[in-house]
Amino acid sequence: MNFEKLKQDIFKKLSEELPGNLCYHNVNHSEKVLEAAERIAVAEGISGDKLILLKTAAILHDCGFLSQYTKNEPVGCRIATDILPDYGYSANQIDEICKLILSTAIPQHPESKLGEVLCDADLDYLGCDDFFPIADSLRKELESNGMNFSDSSWFKFELDFLKQHRYFTETQKKNREPKKQEIIRKLENQLKQLDN
């Protein structure tokens, strides 16, 4: 598996070919998901070929955005199936990578430990200090794709999402859940202020 060459090629493609209005689902997001996946995997004791499969799914998980905005995961899976043999991945490895990519669709339904790590990495920012600027970039992206929000409806949208979300790995429950709960309280206060 020639992961390093794949990573270089995919990040180049994402930076050059993703639509310009993707200010959240851009190459920077994929780089952050890769970093988070690796950090969580190491903490969860994942290594070797399993770690390479996870990292491969992390860099490919949003490639479907190259051709469509909604239901992009199956497209990402098709891209993976088409290109991964050229980088030395076997049919079984590609099947596993596709399952990982598909598990990131919202609502997330990981079917394996690797899937849990990838899903947690994909939504790592929900429990991070930079939640609000990242959430603002998502709002801009959604609005540029036809969804419009008042401040009040946006806070409700975010609150609903955060309250239904759960981290799967013990690492993220420990490292991100407390901050996520703090963000939920901040959003509830912002919503109260708007409603007054």
Image (tube, grey):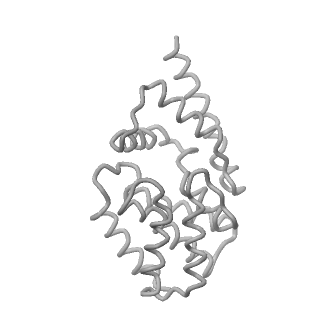
* In-image side of 23 versus 155 (left or right): left
* In-image side of 35 versus 143 (left or right): right
Counting from the top left corner in percent of width and height, residue 160 is at 60, 35
Residue shown at 55% from the left, 28% from the top: 187
Counting from the top left corner in percent of width and height, residue 149 is at 42, 30
Query: Does 188 sit above or below residue 36?
Result: above
When asked about the image quadrant of residue 28, the answer is bottom left
Counting from the top left corner in percent of width and height, residue 1 is at 50, 86
Total numbered labels: 0
When asked about the image quadrant of residue 151, the answer is top left
Counting from the top left corner in percent of width and height, residue 158 is at 53, 36
* In-image side of 105 versus 140 (left or right): right
**Along the line of sight, which residue is nearer the eye, 129 or 152?**
152
Query: Does 105 sit above or below residue 127?
Result: below
**Along the line of sight, which residue is nearer the eye, 101 or 58?**
101
When asked about the image quadrant of residue 126, the answer is top right
Residue found at the far top of this picture: 196
* In-image side of 128 versus 141 (left or right): right
